[in-house]
Amino acid sequence: MNKLSIAATALLLFFFLFIAMYNLFWLWSKEQHLRSKLTYRTQVGWRHALAERFKRFEKLYQHLSELLETLQLKTKPGPFVCMSGLLLLAGFASGGLFFQSLKGTVLFGGVLATMPYIILRAMLVHRRMGTQMDFLPAVELFYQCYLVTGERQVRIALQRTVEERRLLGPMQSVFEQLYRNLSVRGDDEASLRLLAGSLGHLWADYFVNILRVALVEGVPISDSLKELLTDMRRSRRANEQERNRLLEIRVANFSPLLFLALFIGINLHYNKDNSYYYYIIDSQGRDMLLNAIVLIFASFLMGLWLSRKKM
């Protein structure tokens, strides 16, 4: 095991011990806090300091915050980055222990560290695919509610759209999030940006631009919505073809992993001793497994990128 792997193992054990002691202290002090209803929690401590320091990276913090809020996850960017850091240390430790090389330590640590972010992006792609077919009926319902409310305000039309609960699939939660953000949040631009991020296709960008004009200038948007619906109905067949292509890309992402498991399983079935030697003990076999893991991870990233470009 190289020095980097040993250092990562020591740091990982230290963090696990620190987290365990912190949770034990929190459980011990929780009873003391519950005794008084006037307990004042000041914004001090290492967690608040770490969060404030991370906010200095404005673009990264805003990107992670919007991504987590788009997926409607209650996790904050600070703990998410801490989890990625712990996975980085765990990858350094396990990579150095198994592969016993600097290449294996760095590459395996990088794969584990970026895995939470890749999982979030995959969840976002899955959600976007689920909303593509239901976006047209949702806009039609919003258009009807907008006409019924007298073309007065977008927020009133959104409220009526959400309260009728006739939206299909995940579109109900998307419009509820939009209405909640426009009602509570002070930044309308950020709320519209979250809507565009949740849907992730060209028609959603057009719809967001129409809503932006209505919110900023206060002009009627019934003609723009009618034109948008007409164009979307004409291109429905093209959207179905794009959806099939995205499904093909997602299936192709998991095919290398299935083939790798199939080949290793066949070798283990017919010759366990030699397979164990060449996959685990032999350094070239471990290097081959490392290259396979990195290539599969790269193909998965490419599939996510192609899915993003297709939407």
Image (tube, rainbow, N blue to C red):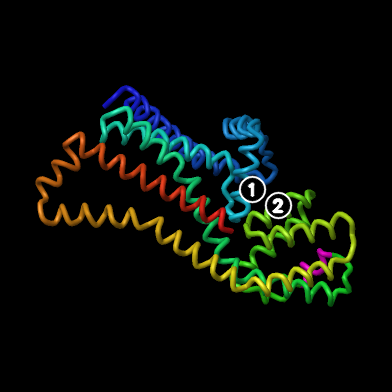
- Please name whichever residue, 103 or 25, is drawn nearer the observer in this view of the structure: 103
- Please name whichever residue, 75 or 187, is drawn nearer the observer in this view of the structure: 187
Give residue 111's quadrant in the image: top left
| Residue tagged 2 | 193
Query: Which x, y percent locates residue 269?
Result: 14, 56
Residue range of the region highlighted in magenta in the rendering = 154-160
Work out which quarter of the rendered image holds the N terminus and state it: top left
Kindly state the secondary structure of the residue where label 1 is placed: helix
Whether the magenta-drawn stretch holds residue 17 is answered as no
- Please name whichever residue, 307 or 10, is drawn nearer the observer in this view of the structure: 307
Give residue 157's quadrant in the image: bottom right
Query: Which x, y percent locates residue 169?
Result: 59, 71
Q: Is residue 163 visible?
A: no
> Which secondary structure type mostly characterizes the magenta part of the structure?
helix
| Residue tagged 1 | 66
The amino acid sitting under disc 2 is: Arg
